Image: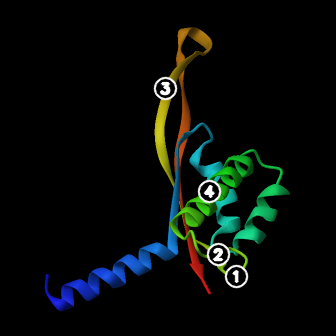
Amino acid sequence: MGARKRLRAEELKKSKKAIAIAQLKNSPISPRKMRLVADLIRGVEVNKALNILNFNSKEASTSLGKLLRSAISNWEQKNEGADISQEVLVVKSIEVGCGTMLKRIQPAPQGRAHRIRKRSNHVTIVVDGTK
């Protein structure tokens, strides 16, 4: 391996150590409702984000709170020697995408049928630690 390639690889390794990722797949809440809560914590410091989620009345906030705690735990696993009280962890990005859709049929008047789409979502949180 050449010198430039090795230096670039070391830089990438160092930058990847600063971030931690957590994913939640097939959450039974519709993506639109989840995005309302996700927008509240995007770019916010982690402790403040946990407080926002803790005092929010929406159902999506409980699953996002668990996911954020998981991302914090993943960051602690990556940085075993680091003290979390010294670091400033920030929710760098949070993405809510569409998951699978359960399609059901509900009877309607005059022999018709209406389709019911039960939506789910996938959420990815990236936590960034800086000093």
What's the mark number on residue 103? 3
Q: CA distance from mark 4 to mark 3?
A: 22 Å
User: How many labels sit on residues?
Assistant: 4
Residue at numbered disc 2: 89
Q: Amino acid at mark 3?
A: Lys
Residue at point 27%, 85% (across, down): 8
Residue lying farthest to the bottom in this orientation:
4
In front: mark 3 or mark 1?
Answer: 1
Residue at point 70%, 75% (across, down): 45
Residue at numbered disc 4: 35
Q: CA distance from mark 2 to mark 3?
A: 40 Å
Q: Amino acid at mark 4?
A: Arg
Q: Quadrant of the C terminus?
A: bottom right
Q: CA distance from mark 2 to mark 1?
A: 10 Å
Asked if 19 appears above or below 104 in the picture, the reply is below
* Quarter of the rendering containing residue 37: bottom right
